[in-house]
Amino acid sequence: MQLKEMGIFKRHDEPVLVPDDVYWRSMEVFNPGAFMDKEGNIVLLYRAIGEYLSYVSRIGVAISEDGVNFRYLGDEPLLYPDRIHDWMGVEDPRVTMAGGKLMIAYASLALPEPGIWPGLRRHISLVGIAEADSNDLESLGRVRKVGVILEPHPNRDAAIVEVKGKLVLLHRPETWGSRPSIWITPLNDYRGELRLREENSKVILEPEGEELKIGLGPPPVRIENEWLMIYHAVYPPMVYVAYAALLDDEFKVLSKTPRPILVPRVEWEVYGDIHHVVFPTGMVIKDDEVLLYYGAGDKVVMMAKADLSSLMSILDKHKME
């Protein structure tokens, strides 16, 4: 399949985060959540792998003043497996300010208890939730796990967003609908062991045409009266690309880019631990620029940027009737 990107986003020439010699991030560093702290620095919460045998993910912290040159903060992970709900790893964090707190939604790989989830022998992907009191590094150092969504399962690609003073969860439940899609569910509480119901939820966006599945990228960002959402789509055989969409306050899709905004094209994206992968998970708006952070080839973190006004103009031109 020939997939041609729109050329809106310009990649930075090299990855902005790569593995180093610290054991738990020595093989892969990818799929970061992103936010701007109170000092104007850009912070990435990255997923890291230190060995391939058990392939257990941890989440660490990196910081940059310019959004390109990052340094790792410390040699210990911020979040790591420490309970039955995430015993096989914590992955792919999405970060938002919501409800007055810094909210981190992540894939929590649980080792099922015998008989609870029949037929699942190794692990199951749940949505885990952690919080910090503010978006400064001191508060981030006191981050705490506060909740896990047990049902639906498997479930991932999640983010918590505040809409009109209320919290909602964007997520991709594998067992709802005909193909894996992006759903939204009101989140009356995010603490403890939670179970969400399909009848209280709605689909935001479903796969189209040859798309095998889609999933949320970074948490949507409010731009004036609309929400800018980046999402990934998967084409046969397993090619991950990125699109952009505009949503209203009811999270109805108003427009989508007619072609992908990013397609695996450069070496890091085409050849990796998993080939042909562009997987955006972090987005920061700075000085009318969209800084998009994404995992490339499940190996490194790359950044691409676009002019916000130009991106919004393209989306405005493709609004649906």
Image (spheres, rainbow, N blue to C red):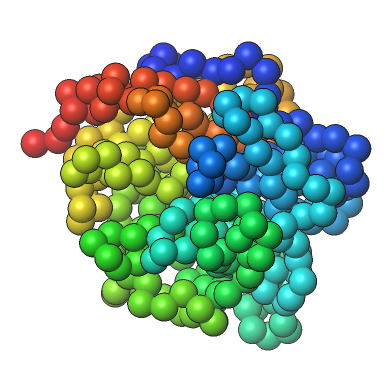
**Number of marks:** 0
Task: Please state the horizontal and vertical placement of residue 255, each as a whole percent of the image.
Answer: 22, 35
Task: Please state the horizontal and vertical placement of residue 166, each as a whole percent of the image.
Answer: 30, 68
Height in image: 78 above or below 284? below
Q: Nearer the viewer, residue 71 or 5?
A: 71
- Name of the residue lying farthest toward the front: 39
Q: Nearer the viewer, residue 174 or 143?
A: 143
In this image, 185 relative to 275: left or right? left
Q: Nearer the viewer, residue 20 or 288?
A: 288
Residue 16 visible in the picture: yes
Residue 141 quadrant: bottom right
- Name of the residue lying farthest toward the left: 321
Residue 240 quadrant: top right
Residue 171 visible in the picture: no
- Residue ID at (29%, 74%): 199
Q: Nearer the viewer, residue 177 or 294?
A: 294
Height in image: 138 above or below 16? below
Residue 113 quadrant: bottom right
- Residue ID at (77%, 71%): 82
In this image, 213 relative to 299: left or right? left
- Residue ID at (19%, 44%): 225
- Residue ID at (41%, 64%): 100
Task: Please state the horizontal and vertical placement of residue 212, each as a whole percent of the image.
Answer: 46, 42
In this image, 271 relative to 288: left or right? right
Task: Please state the horizontal and vertical placement of residue 96, each as a whole percent of the image.
Answer: 46, 53
Of the 4 image quadrants, the one containing the C terminus is top left
